[in-house]
Image: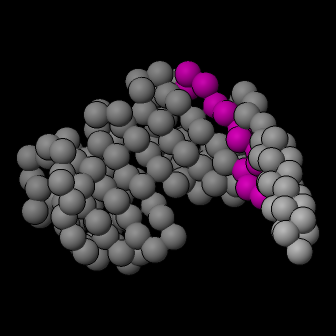
Amino acid sequence: MDTLKKYSIIAVFLIFTGLSATAQKTSITAQQLPATAQDFLKKHFTNQKTAYILKDAETFSTEYKVQLENGIEIEFDKKGNWEEVDGNKNKIPFAILPKNIATYVTTNYKNTEVVKIEKGNWDYEVKLNNGLELKFNAKGEFLRLDD
């Protein structure tokens, strides 16, 4: 019985090792991004040039990472929906924020800039240039403050 368990564990390990080995990061052009991602970049970063664009194709998922020359990084899912916009301490376009979140930030943090936003399955995390991190639910309702 112990031998069977050992072989099972080894088999599972080899399967997962093989699956992770199939991940590939390749450099692509903006025209190779999903249309939704292309539209997002045109709308919010019209005058920004890209430093590089990577397609991260894994066994069960594909993601895209765009690095702009001004240091802003944008991550997209396989359909081209943004998942994260990181200004790397530079402000990001306010129009990216969902309406409820934008209203909350302008009302409660007038003299700050948004430098990062992450969209999860059930929430948003917004980082301000004063170091505060704000958590919102999927509807954009404020949940809590992290520092």
Residue 14, image x, y percentages: 86, 51
Does the segment drawn in magenta span residue 51?
A: yes
Q: Which residues are magenta?
A: 50-62
In this rendering, is residue 145 above or below 24? below
Locate residue 78 relative to residue 138 in the image: left or right.
Answer: right
Q: Which is more toward the observer, 65 or 12?
A: 12
Is residue 80 in view?
A: no
> Secondary structure of the magenta portion, mostly?
strand
Identified at 46% across, 74% down, the residue is 122
Q: Which is more toward the observer, 42 or 125?
A: 125
Q: How is the image coloured?
A: one colour
Q: Quarter of the image holding residue 30?
A: top right
Is residue 118 in view?
A: yes
In this rendering, is residue 69 above or below 90? above
Identified at 19% across, 64% down, the residue is 145
Identified at 80% across, 47% down, the residue is 17
Q: Residue furthest front?
A: 2
Locate residue 92 relative to residue 63 in the image: left or right.
Answer: left
Q: Quarter of the image holding residue 54?
A: top right
| Rendered-image quadrant of the C terminus | bottom left
Locate residue 83 relative to residue 89 in the image: left or right.
Answer: right
Identified at 47% across, 50% down, the residue is 84
Residue 119, image x, y percentages: 45, 61
Q: Which is more toward the observer, 141 or 41?
A: 141
| Rendered-image quadrant of the N terminus | bottom right
Residue 26, image x, y percentages: 75, 31
Q: How many marks?
A: 0
Q: Quarter of the image holding residue 87?
A: top left
Does the segment drawn in magenta span residue 55?
A: yes
In this rendering, is residue 1 above or below 63? below
Residue 4, image x, y percentages: 91, 69
